[in-house]
Each structure stands twice: as C-alpha cells, then as structure tokens.
Amino acid sequence: MMELSVAIVNWNAEDLLIQCLGFINQMMPGMRKEVFVVDNGSANGMSTIVKERFPEVNLIQNQRNVGFAKANNQAFRLSKGKYLLLLNPDTKVKEGAIERLISFMDIHPDAGVAGGQLLNGDGSRQNSIANFPSLATELLNKSLLRRFFPKKFPGKERNYSGPVEVDSVIGACMMVRRVALEQVGLLDEDYFLFLEETDWCYRMKRAGWKVYHVPQAEVYHFQGKSAGTARKRARVEFYRSRYHFFKKNRGHFQRFILLTGLMIRLGVELVAITLGSLVTLFTIKDWREKLSIYAYLLWWHLRLCPKGMGLNQLER
C-alpha cells in the first residue's frame, strides 16, 4: 500500500509551490508517496512549469477557484496512501518532519489527525493549534485566553516538549489517517476557505478519534500568500466560515449571538480607526488598509452576507 499521499492546493502562488515541491523531493527521497497538486484556476502558466519540472506529480487543473475543501477532496478521492497530508504551497518542510508525523501515527493507532509545529521565516513559532470555535474564542481576545488559560486554550505561548492532544490543528500541515477519513467522510465543501480542517477535526473527535499536535515535526509556513492577494474578500470568507461552523455545530441561537457580537465589534473598530485616520490625516498606511477592510466587512453584513462579495466569486 502507498505510505503517503500529499495534497497541495494552489491558487496564484506558483513560486512558492515550485519551492514546496522541491523541498518534498529533497526531504522524502525514499518514501513510497504520491503527490497531488490541485490548481484552483490560477491566472498564470503554473501547470506547464509543474509538468516540466515535476513530471511525477499528479496535476488536477480546475478552471476556477472551487475552494480549499473541494480541491483537497478531489485529490483525496484519487489517493491511495495509508496517510494523507494536507500541505500548503507556502510551506517549507524541515528535514524529518513528515517522517516524525508518520512515525507518531504508526505508534498511536487512536490518532486520526496529527499536525506539526508551524514556524515563521525567522524560526519563531506560529499558532499551530486551534480550539473549536465558541463564543469565548470568537468574541474575546484569543491571545489573552491562551495566556491566562493555557490548558484550555493551548497555543504558541507554551513550549511543548512532546506531542499533546488538542481540539484541532492548522491545515497548513495536517496528516490524516485514511481509515479515519473513510469513517468520518471528506472535508465539508460548504466551507470555501478557513475552518474546514477545524470542522473535520470536530467530526473526527465526535467519531472517537484523537487529534494531536506534534511539535517535533517543524514546518516553515510563509502564511497568507494566496489569500493575501485579496485581503478584504478573504476576511469575508473567514467570517462566513465562522457562521457556518456555528450554524452546523453550535445551533442557530449561538450563531445569532456571534453575528450580533461581531457586528457590534466591527462597528466600534470602524469608528475608532476612522477617528484615528482623521487625526493623522490618513497618513498611516496600515490604518488606511484596516479602515477599508472594516468598512467592507460591515457593508457585507448590512447586505445580509451575500456570496458575491467573497473569494468564491473571483474566478467565475
């Protein structure tokens, strides 16, 4: 049986993708693996470059951006590996990282999912663990929750000496056991981008599987490069995904409270950043960008959250 199937979803990140594929070949030369690249309608000649430099890669080309969940599912349906690895194109796998995840999964048959430690370019830790969304995590400051309640809200502030069971891991580098996938099912394609892996882990846990963070498996993550090309629309998708998670897993009442709370917070932030920009005569670029994003998000809410203002309409 094939040991590992790697799924990489690309959207307009061709330089990082080529770099990522090169790292995979260098770091795992003797492993029985297959690599799938699902291109979500990138506006460049990426497919030709991948075919020329990496002829062994299974390339799936979509005419438009179908979303992260649906694109990964395309690869999963064709894959044959005992383990499946979701890997972002904006990652650099450190030597031994993937092998450590596989070894951990082999030793712990109760593990349905395992994620590595994500690193910034300078080697500092990124958040690699995600709590299941709740009113507390979405309406309060996540950094303060992690700092004052580290056992309930684990994060990058704590240095873990070994693997630890968590709610969910970040999908930039996430290994899944095929048996668990076959029991729980594929990613929920109602998520276009963000929280699809969190929802998957939630379903895994409900089915009796465990989810682990493995800090010894280190992966550089140059995060947000694809979504960063359309920041306002990406933020809309993040909000939309949160509302979908609550509707699906928390109920309509909690979703209503979340929607109300986030709209109030957006209004307050918009007023504050507007006043600050006026005082500084709009000379601070970061504030101008935030003002544009907050206004866009509030307008999206006031329009009753239409689909046409998110990333899922960019390539149609």
Image (tube, grey):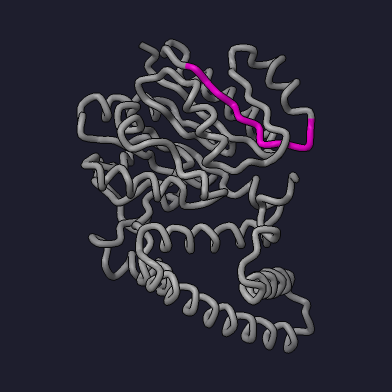
Q: Is residue 207 magenta?
A: no
Q: Quadrant of the C terminus?
A: top right
Number of numbered discs present? 0
153 left or right of 123?
left
Residue at left 48%, top 41%? 172
Nearer to me, 65 or 128: 65
223 left or right of 128?
right
Is there any visible trace of residue 248 in the rendered image? yes
Magenta-highlighted stretch: main secondary structure?
strand
Q: Quadrant of the N terminus?
A: top left
- 224 over 6 or under it: above or below: below
| Residue 53 place in picture, x, y as percent | 68, 16
| Residue 155 place in picture, x, y as percent | 35, 56
Nearer to me, 91 or 184: 184
Magenta residues? 34-44
- 16 over 272 or under it: above or below: above
Is there any visible trace of residue 290 in the rendered image? no
Which image quarter: residue 55? top right
Residue at left 41%, top 13%? 31
Residue at left 51%, top 57%? 241
Which image quarter: residue 112? top left
Residue at left 31%, top 56%? 158
| Residue 161 place in picture, x, y as percent | 25, 44
Nearer to me, 224 or 262: 262
| Residue 28 place in picture, x, y as percent | 45, 18
